Every structure is written in C-alpha cells, then in structure tokens.
Amino acid sequence: LAGITGYGDLSPVVSLLSGICCIGGIAGLSSQSTARLGNVLGQTGITLGLAATMGHLQPTPTETLQIAGLLGSGGAIGYGIASRVGPQELPQTVAAFHSLVGIAAAATAIGEYAHLVHDAKALDLSTAVSLYLATWIGGITATGSVVAFGKLNGMIGSAPLALPMRDQLNIGMGVASLGAMALFCTNPSPATGFAALTAATGLSGALGLHMTASIGGADVPVVITVLNSYSGWALCAEGFMLDSPLLTIVGALIGSSGAILTHIMCEAMNRDIGNVLLGGYGSVAKGPSAMSMDHGEHTEIDVDETAKLLKEATSVIIVPGYGLAVAKAQYAVAEIAKMLNDSGIKTRFAIHPVAGRMPGQLNVLLAEAGVPYDIVFEMDEINDELPSTDIALVIGANDTVNSAAVEDPNSIIAGMPVIQVWKAKQSIVMKRTMGSGYAGAQNPVFFKHNNAMLLGDAKKMCDGLRSKLSEL
C-alpha cells in the first residue's frame, strides 16, 4: 500500500516499530501490574511484524490468498486451543507450542537450503552455519518439548529416564552433530548437504528426546524455560539465515529472556543448569534420606476448626500450589482472602518462583480470580515475616514448602529455597492426600507439632471455608 501511494517501502520502519513493541512487551511482562499492557504490546509487535513481512515479500494476489488462508486457518486453530485451555493447563500448552516453533525452524531451514543449494555465492559460510543451527536447535526444541508436554500432561511418568551410559550417549550425539556441521559447512554436493541436514535433524531430535526424558520431575519448570530459550535461538538463527533483522531481534529477545529466566529458576531451586540439562541432578537422593524415617503421626483438622483459627488470627499468609490450579479453587481462595482482610485480618499470598508447573502459573491464577497485586508476594519478600505470622495456610503446595530442603542434606531437594511455613505459629496444609510432591520427596512439615492437615479436595475445602467464615 505504501508503494502504491508513493511512500516507498515502509517495511523497514514497520519492522523497527515491531521490534520496539516486542521489547516493550517483554518489559511489561516483568510486573503483574503492567502485564496486560505487555501482552497488548507483544500482540501489536507480532501484528506489525506480519505486516512488515508482507510488505517485504510483495506477494502476488494468488500468493496473498495462500498466505491469508494459512494465517486464517492457523489463527482459528490457535484460538480454538486457547479457548479451551485454562490456567492449570498452561504449562503443557506452552510446551506443545514450543514444539511447533522447533518444527517450523527446522522445516524452514531445510526449505531454504533447497532454495539456495545451487547458488554457491548465496550459500556462504555464515548462511550455512545459520541453516545448520536452525535445523539442529529446532530439532532439539521440537522433541524436547513433546517429551516435556508428555510429562506435564501425565502421559509420561515424572521419574527420569536412566539409560546405561547416558552421558556417553549425549556426548556421542553431540560429537556426531559437530561432525555433520563441519561437513555441511564445506559446501558439499546437494546430496551430501541434505544428508548432513538429515543427520542434524535426527541427532538433535534424539538428543532433545533423551535429555528431556532424563530430567526428573522436580526440574520440569526449568526445562520449560530452557526450551523457551532454545526456541528463541532457533528463530535468531533463522533471522541470520533469511537476512531478517526483525526475526533476529525477536529471536534474541526470546532466547535471552528465556536464558535469564532459566538462571533465576535454577537459583530458586538451588540447581546447576548443566546438571539439570544432563539429568544428573535432582534425579536421585544423595544418600539415606530422612524421608525414609518414621516421622510419627500427623494431626488432622476439619473445615470448622480451620475457619475458627483463621477468624481468631491477626495475620494470615496463604501459600498456593499446583493443587490449587488442578482443583480450580482460585476464586474461592480469593473470596476467603477478601473476607479475612475485610475483617481486619492481615492476609497475604506467598508465591514460590517455581510454584506450579511453570514460572508465573500461580500469579496468573490469582490475577484471574481478582486477587489484588499488592497482597501477592514472592518467597524472598515473605519468608522473614513467617515467624510473626499466626496462620500459614498451604493450599495444594508440597515441594515448595518442604522443610527437608533445609533440614535434610540427603533429600532429593536439599538446598532448594522454600517458603518456610513451619516457622509460623500454626501451619495448616490443605491437600488431597498425604502423598509426596512432584519431586517424590516426603514432607516433614506434615508431621510437625504446629501443623495440621486439612485433607480433601481443595475446591470443596475452600468452598466450605468460605461458607463457614461468612457465618462467623
């Protein structure tokens, strides 16, 4: 349109605006209060990016119809999936979409090679490296994301795969991948080049599958952020390959933000990223653990007594976990917090950085239920206040409040920073059963003298608490 009206090619300007909006979107997502604006900026950036791409391609009417058909069908499928996905299914949905990014990156790279294979001048070293990396990273992202989806969706067990000589397998596939890359970058015959790319696809796919399957359930939140980073670097390689600054910028944004988030997650879980990726940490306990000890009898409490304790308290900290998401109890919990605050009882929420199955999942749940941002705190902000808190109410959380991380050096989660609910004057853990958490570690908090277990479905228990509190 710009060309027709005499304004020349505006695609570079629109691309720049798209990049700025995407950067603003990432910045906006750093805070709950600006997250909605961040989403709008991100959507605007992607829309402008599509417009800039169309302007750069200058497609014929027939090609425009084909592109519109693909965009329409893809958008309809995406909208249909998003409409059926609730906050509790977000982690596996994100993992599934990451696999699509990996497939697209690998397919685009192979297609671009088929387009350039007979043009030696266009297929220079930097282009060849970009082609290979896009294929290789795309393969790892695709298969790794599929396995992560399976683990998160319960189709695959959370226990790590422990094949004999697994480190040697990973090293062998890595060396073979480097060999195929070296061969590909020598600009061989088309047949050899396609064979090298096929090898890259197969090796990277097998590597992504094996490495992700070898990661224990406790580290799955980290895997999500790593795969997010991988998908960004795959896009970045495509940007170099297609000479698209916009794709390079967006890919670098996703890759670097995913890497930074991975670092934050590893710090929050006391994990070493190298060991997480190689499946060598968090998979087994370091020695005889206290989880095998007899902790004694636990104390149980009912809804009526819990409501009475909450009503008599002056300060309450609610610690939600993945069980809250599964039970869809966020609205009832939000009402409970409002009722307590309206009664003059200082009530706040404490969110662990890895609560749920992906970063921010519990924040999304609480925001959806209308919980004010100013009463939601991170672990580091709230831990020091627990000793002076009357009631710590844990709803569907386990590993993130497990005292074994602090007290048992042989625990599978030893050293992991946790919300120290056992330091409150009274802790109440609302949980369906006495079973262990996703990491497979028993929780000594359940058996402490100042803890009581409110066993049952979180939604049913929270609805009961809400009704009882309204009567008191």
Image (tube, rainbow, N blue to C red):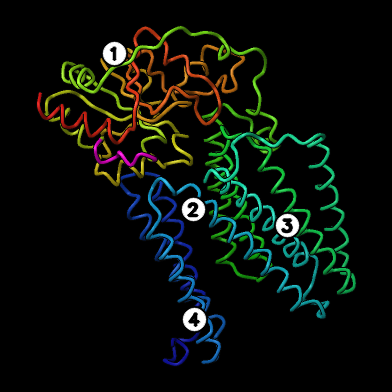
Amino acid, disc 2: Thr
Residue 374 appears at what percent x and percent y?
A: 26, 36
Sequence-wise first label, 2 or 4: 4
Amino acid, disc 1: Ser
Sequence-wise first label, 3 or 4: 4
Residue 433 or residue 128, whichever sits in front: 433
Q: State the separation of the CA atoms marked 2 and 1.
A: 39 Å
- Chain part drawn in magenta: 326-332
Q: Which of labels 2 and 1 is toward the front?
A: 2
Q: Secondary structure at mark 1?
A: helix
Residue 265 appears at what percent x and percent y?
A: 53, 35
Residue, disc 3:
136
Question: Which residue is painted at 66% across and 24% down in the image?
Answer: 284
Sequence-wise first label, 3 or 2: 2
Residue, disc 2:
93
Overall secondary structure of the magenta stretch? helix
Asked whether disc 3 touches disc 2, contact meaning CB atoms under 8 Å apart, the reply is no
Q: Secondary structure at mark 2?
A: helix
Q: State the separation of the CA atoms marked 3 and 2.
A: 23 Å
Mark 3 surroundings within 10 Å by alpha-carbon count, few (fewer than 14), some (14 through 19), many (20 or more): many
Asked whether disc 2 touches disc 1, contact meaning CB atoms under 8 Å apart, the reply is no
Asked whether disc 3 touches disc 4, contact meaning CB atoms under 8 Å apart, the reply is no
Q: Which of labels 1 and 4 is toward the front?
A: 4
Amino acid, disc 4: Gly
Residue 425: name its quadrant: top left
Q: Which of labels 3 and 2 is toward the front?
A: 2
Residue, disc 1:
388
Residue 281 appears at what percent x and percent y?
A: 66, 28
Residue, disc 4:
69
Q: State the separation of the CA atoms marked 1 and 4.
A: 60 Å
The C terminus: image quadrant = top left
